[in-house]
């Protein structure tokens, strides 16, 4: 399959995560995957060459050729270059992923932070749709990712998972990996998430928090336990596909800009 032409052409989205590299062609009119996504395990060590092989494998599964590909990365990304690598191999820092992947895939490639991608998708098709005030999307997974919007516009690479609260980095206290690694109960974990949200509320006064990452599927287990936060707190609606959809949206936007 190719991406075809015309305004409703499909674009490919790939989400590079701590455990898996997932991708699919995306239907940008509906903000949905156009086909069932394909996943390969994230290699360990997660070096650039090994991860790029994984991304290539995911696109090959769909025989994708030519059309734009959007890719998320779990770190700061500026001008297609990776600047931080908190939860992946440190050799990523300084890698121009747009150039590296563009060469391997022979397609135009756009790269952005994973939480930014998820946030963009949620603001357009999911829980944040229509919200004009400050909205903070948080993804709870191996780390904590953040995406901050006001009037629907993203401030990229905010990295609020690394805020220091009571002497601890937030993602080392409240990511869902920490919940698993330390066998925290829902109520113990919700307590930590509440402390984190209160801190963000003190700094940003958002009207809404959108809670994403795999754990958003179990929102009913912990959101009711978070009572002392003023902002509305809602689970992400695109759940685990938000990154793929947001990546494809970013790629389509770059393609439009270039054309
Ligand atoms: C990284 C962020 C990323 C988040 C979620 C953090 O450790 O620094 O860039 O968005 O994890 O993957």
Image (cartoon, helix red, strand yellow):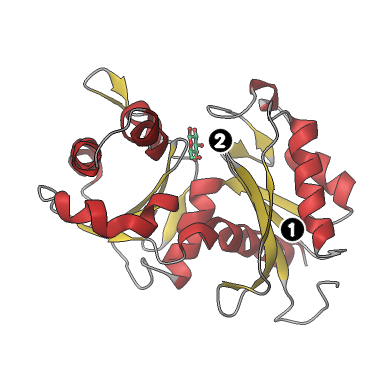
> In the image, is residue 103 above or below residue 1?
above
Q: Earlier in the sequence, mark 2 or mark 1?
A: 1
> Residue at the spot x=30%, y=57% of the render?
219
| SS category of the residue bearing label 2 | loop
> Residue at the spot x=33%, y=60% of the render?
235
> x, y (%) of residue 166?
21, 21
Callout 2 touching callout 1 (CB < 8 Å): no
> Between marks 2 and 1, how big is the CA–CA gap?
18 Å
Rendering quarter of residue 174: top left
Ligand 1 within 8 angstroms of badge 2 C-beta: yes
Depth order, front residue of 223/258: 223
Rendering quarter of residue 44: top right
> x, y (%) of residue 101?
81, 44
Q: Is residue 85 visible?
A: yes
> x, y (%) of residue 56?
81, 49
Pick the quarter of the image with the C terminus.
Answer: bottom right
Ligand 1 within 8 angstroms of badge 1 C-beta: no
> In the image, is residue 4 above or below residue 74?
below
Pick the quarter of the image with the N terminus.
Answer: bottom right
> Residue at the spot x=46%, y=65% of the render?
238
Rendering quarter of residue 49: top right
- Which class describes the residues within 10 Å of circle 1: few (<14), some (14-19), or many (20+)? many
Depth order, front residue of 132/186: 186
> In the image, is residue 113 above or below residue 251?
above
Which mark, by number, is residue 75?
Answer: 2
In the shown orientation, is residue 45 left or right of residue 200? right
- Which class describes the residues within 10 Å of circle 2: few (<14), some (14-19), or many (20+)? many
In the shown orientation, is residue 74 left or right of residue 187? right
| Disc 1: which residue | 69
């Amino acid at each position: 399959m190719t991406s075809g032409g015309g305004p409703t052409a499909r674009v490919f989205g790939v989400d590079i995560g701590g455990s898996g590299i997932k991708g699919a062609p995306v239907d940008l009119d509906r903000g949905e995957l156009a086909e069932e996504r394909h996943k390969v395990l994230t290699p360990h060590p997660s070096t650039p060459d090994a991860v790029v092989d994984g991304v290539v494998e995911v696109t090959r599964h769909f025989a994708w050729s030519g059309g734009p590909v959007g890719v998320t990365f779990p770190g700061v990304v500026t001008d297609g270059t990776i600047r931080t690598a908190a939860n992946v191999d440190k050799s990523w820092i300084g890698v121009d992923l747009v150039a590296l992947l563009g060469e391997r895939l022979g397609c135009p490639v756009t790269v952005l932070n994973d939480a930014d991608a998820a946030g963009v998708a949620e603001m357009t098709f999911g829980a944040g749709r229509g919200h004009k005030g400050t909205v903070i999307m948080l993804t709870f997974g191996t780390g904590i990712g953040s995406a901050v919007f006001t009037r629907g516009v993203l401030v990229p690479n905010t990295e609020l998972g690394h805020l220091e609260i009571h002497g601890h980095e937030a993602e080392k206290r409240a990511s869902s990996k920490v919940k698993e690694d330390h066998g925290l109960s829902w109520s113990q974990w919700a307590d930590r998430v509440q402390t984190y949200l209160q801190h963000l509320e003190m700094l940003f006064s958002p009207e809404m928090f959108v809670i994403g990452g795999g754990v958003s599927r179990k929102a009913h287990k912990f959101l009711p336990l978070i009572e002392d936060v003023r902002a509305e707190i809602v689970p992400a609606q695109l759940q685990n596909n938000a990154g793929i959809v947001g990546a494809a949206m970013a790629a389509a936007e770059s393609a439009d800009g270039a054309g």
